[in-house]
Amino acid sequence: MSTASTFDDDRPPPVRPAYDGRTWREVAHLLGNLPEGLVGFVYTVLWLFPGIALSVTVIGVPLLAAGLAGSRALGGLARARARTLLGVRIEEPSPLPRRGGRLLRLRLRLTDPVAWRTTLYAFLRLPWGVLSFVLTVVALLLAWPVLAYVTRALTSVDRAMVRSLLSPSSELERRVAELEQDRGVVVDTAAADLRRIERDLHDGAQARLVSLAMGLGLAKEKVLEDPDAAAKMVDEAHGEVKLALQELRDLARGIHPAVLTDRGLDAALSAVAARCTVPVTVDVDLDERPAPAIEGIAYFTVSELLQNISKHSHARTAEIELWRTKERLLIQVRDDGRGGASTDKGSGLAGLAERLGSVDGLFTVDSPEGGPTVVTAELPWRERA
């Protein structure tokens, strides 16, 4: 009887020749369990216990991370062997995210469920490898008529171990890893924004207020002895006050504009478009307002895109469109400039893509050389509380 093309199941073996190709593949797998188990066990012992013992030092944590990375690689080899010899159809797990800082990537490596399950698999393989090797050798030498049944029973255990310990991360585990990374991006972005605000206050409004205080102090001293000079100093101080107030208003607008809070995206984006050096048309088709957090991200996304258009595009016109499709907020910004915009790492557009990704959004750029440029962004629609 010919062997079936798929055999990833645990049913009793069909009536078949004792020495067909499938049987020999199973025998090869069982005989390979011992060297595989020995290599995996020794490798795991060499990094796991020293890493745990040294975890209080600067050496231990990187050692654990490197060991877990190696365990992931050994898991890939074990899955490939199971696919080839046992016909176990199992997908490869998703790779760990590569974005974010070094500490974030280290944390993701240390909390990788795939690597830790592979580590447990390596520990279990040595005793099981010894047992399955011995039983297979005995069946080969002394019990040829039941060889197919022995190998079938033993490889059923192998299949169960591969499926339970070497299977890809569940969707929940994958999303947890992505959200861990996205949280790091949000933290980094928030820290950068705080540094920018601090720098703007220090170099702008704060410096003007210090100068204003000094000017008023000098004017106070000259009020009696030189009223004209004092009046001139007060007049200069009045101009400094106006400039300081304007800088504070600009800074507050960069944090969260009052018009966005009071009147929503339509009015806020119209105000931003009016300040753009390129004529901009705004079309906001929303029956209701999304949650404040989503509204703020949409506003700052469009604001930064309009700044890019003003500085780099050489465009004559631009368009902004916002609309809702089911549970997504869609944003599209077009300009007829020279094109060539890219989300390559380090660009402002790459930062926007990371920000939107942190809230489960999407960001795409279509900008061939010569233009036009079309930027499309999607955000999850969340109702206002």
Image (cartoon, rainbow, N blue to C red):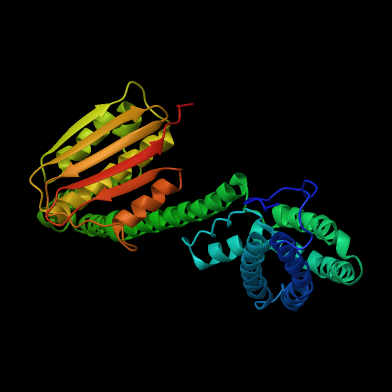
Looking at the image, residue 355 sits to the left or right of residue 276; the answer is: right
Q: Residue furthest left?
A: 316
Q: How many marks?
A: 0
Q: Is residue 167 visible?
A: yes
**Can you say whether 340 is above or below 289 in the image?**
below
Looking at the image, residue 281 sits to the left or right of residue 118; the answer is: left
Q: Is residue 240 visible?
A: no
> Where in the figure is residue 335, as x and y percent of width and height?
15, 45
Name which residue lies at 87% across and 59% down. 146
Name which residue lies at 39% across and 54% down. 193
> Where in the figure is residue 200, as x and y percent of width and height?
31, 56
State the residue in front, 76 or 4: 4
State the residue in front, 11 or 132: 11
Looking at the image, residue 345 sits to the left or right of residue 246; the answer is: right
> Where in the figure is residue 375, as x and y percent of width and height?
25, 45
> Where in the figure is residue 17, as x and y percent of width and height?
77, 57
For residue 202, what is the image quadrant? bottom left
Q: Residue furthest top?
A: 287
Name which residue lies at 58% across and 66% down. 106
Q: Residue furthest right?
A: 142
State the residue in front, 370 or 158: 158
